[in-house]
Image: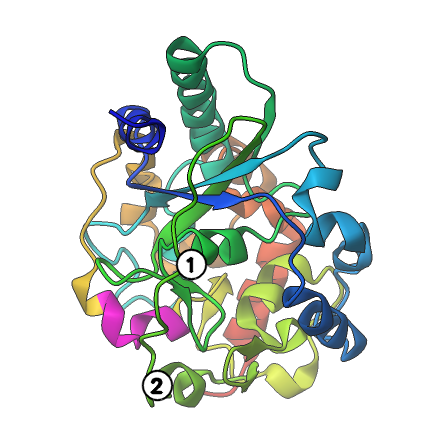
Amino acid sequence: MDKKTTIVQLAKQAGFDYCGISKAQYLENEAPRLEKWLRRGHHGTMEWMQNHFDKRLDPRLLVPGAKTIISLLVNYYPEKDLFENKKYKISRYAYAIDYHIVIKKMMDEFVQLLEHAFGHIEGRCFVDSAPVMDKVWAAKSGLGWIGKNANLITKQHGSYYFVAEYITDLEADADHAIPDYCGTCTRCIDACPTDAISEPYVVDGSKCISYLTIELKDEIDARYAGKMKNWIFGCDICQEVCPWNSFAKAHQNADFKPFEVYLGMTEKDWEEINEDFFELYLKKSALKRTKLKGLKRNILLSLNSPSN
């Protein structure tokens, strides 16, 4: 087997669904786009998005000596929508244990397999935790294309994937990007209740329901009352309407088994949620990002909003 084939097989052995390879280099085309996005204030209060601008565009500044970026995808699409016909909704990616915990373990195994196959290599693993443009690298490696909702979309099974990277000095032949298959479709743009997709392929993060319910630490602007569609953590609307997600298949990862507590929670349970419950059942979930204070803010906004 050639080196690339071996890397892909080892990634699947470690539990990843897809693996693609790209050359570590400066993202020349992304520089003006990122600068314009930041200048428009689309990052909202996420000031960290302005930091390490050069490193965000050149992975060799993050990992000296890097030659290759191995992009990895993990399917998280659940067997069923736990919040269908429920008043309060949370994004599918938060149904189970925090993905950072699961994927970090998978990455450690993957690196061990690589070193067993190729000897000592240098590199760093990234799981949505550093200035790495993960979707861009995944697209460059041919795993999918970045859609009009700014999500990475795969032709095989849509967009319900976590993205991770291993930036390394291991040399391997790069894959090639694939075409954009969004075509003339505008379903994600039309469906976004807060008009966060300001233009095709550009998301104004400061208007996105995921940002408002997770990243924003202040009170949510009253103009969004009635537009949140009862999402209290994250939002899947632009993915739910995407035709490519009609091909989504349920994951087979036991670590992403949904928390059983969600199955029996009533509206009243959510409205009366307290610190003890949060610590007992949700401290290992992604919901810790917004903390109990933020979650209660989101629930209260939904409870007191006009019909949405």
Q: From the top left corner, tell me how far across and down residue 139 is, in percent.
A: 44, 58
Nearer-N-terminus badge (1/2): 1
Q: Does residue 166 sit above or below 117 in this rendering?
A: below
Q: SS of the residue at dot 1?
A: strand
Q: Please give the residue where the numbered disc 1 appears in the rendered image.
A: 90
Of residue 279 and residue 82, the one placed in the foreground of this image is 82
* Residue type pointed to by label 1: Ile
Of residue 132 and residue 303, the one placed in the foreground of this image is 132
Q: From the top left corner, tell me how far across and down residue 98 is, in percent.
A: 47, 38
> Residue 241 magenta-drawn?
yes
What residue is at 64 percent from the left and 66 percent from the top? 30
Q: From the top left corner, tell me how far across and down residue 118 is, in percent.
A: 43, 14
Of residue 31 and residue 254, the one placed in the foreground of this image is 31
* Residue type pointed to by label 2: Arg
Q: From the top left corner, tell me how far across and down residue 240 is, in percent.
A: 31, 71
**Which segment did they paint magenta?**
237-245
Q: Badge 1: how crowded within 10 Å, few (<14), some, or many (20+)? A: many
Q: Please give the residue where the numbered disc 2 appears in the rendered image.
A: 187
